[in-house]
Image (tube, rainbow, N blue to C red):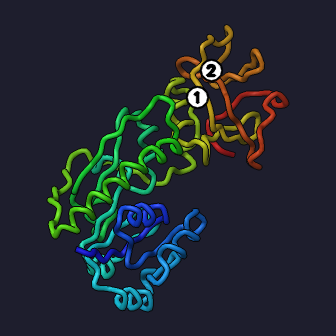
């Protein structure tokens, strides 16, 4: 069966599908600053390609209908909601980088690490009118390493997510529809974009909790703190293997052996990577005073 696929997402997904023998009939790419657009123009020449179209625009809808007769809609990192009138054109599926219904939303990487999850994964599910609520088709479990950051976790989940898409289209190509299981109503958590408050370091927490926040926010936007009125973003930190000096209060910093440390509610953290608001490395040695817990 020659599948007619309408694809939404980054060029990487379209390339993997094409290499597997299932090139999209039409593709909507976004964000536009990711690599692969030149490949798409070459390998998908003669097929409909749209760059981050407004799916609410009636002209876009008519254009997709003209190229239509789709057997399936597939989504891989599409940045906006796909409206119901588009989803109604064919059975629609997408991958989500968490084990649904845990961490529904746009930033599961941050919340997976922030929550201290030891395991995560990817979920292939039906797309519906609301985010990440459709019936589950398949899932793959992946361990979270103690040193994973949001970035490394995202890269780690790409491969199993794409494998699920290829397995799905291979099944659809035989004329078989996959079985679907409604998401459970228990265990639902949300994963919104972290707020400034979510990103602010609370030094009264344990050193392990502070490091988890730094990893969750790394490499960007970084976990926020201020040192004597100087805002910084901490993008790399580790639990200190040394004890704070006697008399040092929680949230006070000290330097030893060329490194900066901060006392936490339990233990201490070594600051391994800090930058200022300008994105440049911060010269902490020029600042004195007490680090705060919020952004200024």
Quarter of the view holding residue 178: bottom left
Task: Name the spot of residue 89 as percent of width and height, x first.
Answer: 28, 81
Q: Residue at x 38, y 71 (%)?
A: 23
Image coordinates of residue 175 in percent, x first then y, are 16, 70
Report if the CB atoms under discs 2 and 1 are less than 8 Å apart: yes
Crowding at dot 1, Cα within 10 Å, few <14 / some 14-19 / many 20+, comes out as many
Nearest to N terminus: mark 2 or mark 1:
1
- Identify the residue under disc 1: 203
Q: CA distance from mark 2 to mark 1?
A: 7 Å
Whole-percent x, y for residue 274 in the image? 70, 36
Mark 2 lies on residue: 263
Q: Secondary structure at mark 2?
A: strand
The x, y position of residue 207, in whole percent, is 54, 23
Query: In the shown orientation, is residue 199 left or right of residue 227?
Result: left
Q: Quadrant of the N terminus?
A: bottom left
Q: Secondary structure at mark 1?
A: loop
The residue drawn where x is 77% and y is 27% is: 289
Tell me where residue 19 sits by quadrant.
bottom left
Using residue 38 as the reference point, say whether residue 133 is left or right of it: left
Query: Would residue 268 be found to the left or right of residue 289 on screen?
Result: left
Residue drawn where x is 29% and y is 65% of the image: 93
């Amino acid at each position: 069966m020659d599948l007619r696929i309408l694809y939404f997402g980054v060029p990487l997904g379209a390339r993997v599908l094409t290499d597997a023998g299932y090139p999209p009939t039409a593709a909507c790419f976004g964000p536009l600053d990711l690599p692969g657009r030149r490949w798409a123009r070459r390998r998908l020449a003669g097929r409909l390609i749209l760059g981050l179209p407004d799916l609410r625009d009636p002209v876009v809808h008519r254009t997709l209908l003209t190229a239509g007769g789709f057997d399936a809609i597939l989504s891989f990192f599409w940045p906006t909601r796909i409206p119901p009138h588009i989803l109604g054109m064919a059975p629609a599926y997408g991958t989500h980088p968490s084990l649904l219904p845990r961490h529904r939303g746009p930033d599961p990487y941050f919340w997976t690490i922030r929550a201290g999850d030891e395991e995560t994964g990817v979920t292939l599910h039906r797309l519906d009118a609301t985010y990440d609520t459709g019936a589950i088709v398949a899932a793959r479990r992946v361990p979270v390493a103690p040193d994973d950051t949001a970035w490394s976790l995202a890269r780690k989940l790409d491969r199993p997510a794409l494998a699920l898409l290829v397995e799905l289209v291979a099944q659809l190509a035989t004329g078989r529809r996959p079985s679907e299981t409604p998401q459970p109503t228990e265990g639902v958590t949300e994963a919104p974009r972290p707020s400034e408050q979510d990103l602010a370091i609370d030094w009264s927490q344990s050193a392990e909790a502070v490091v988890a926040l730094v990893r969750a926010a790394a490499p960007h936007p970084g976990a926020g703190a201020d040192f004597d009125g100087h805002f910084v973003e901490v993008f790399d930190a580790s639990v200190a293997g040394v004890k704070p000096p006697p008399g040092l209060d929680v949230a006070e910093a000290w330097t030893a052996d060329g490194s900066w440390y901060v006392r936490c509610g339990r233990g201490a953290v070594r600051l391994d990577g800090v930058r200022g608001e300008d994105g440049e490395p911060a010269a902490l040695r020029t600042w004195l005073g007490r680090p705060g817990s919020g952004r200024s």
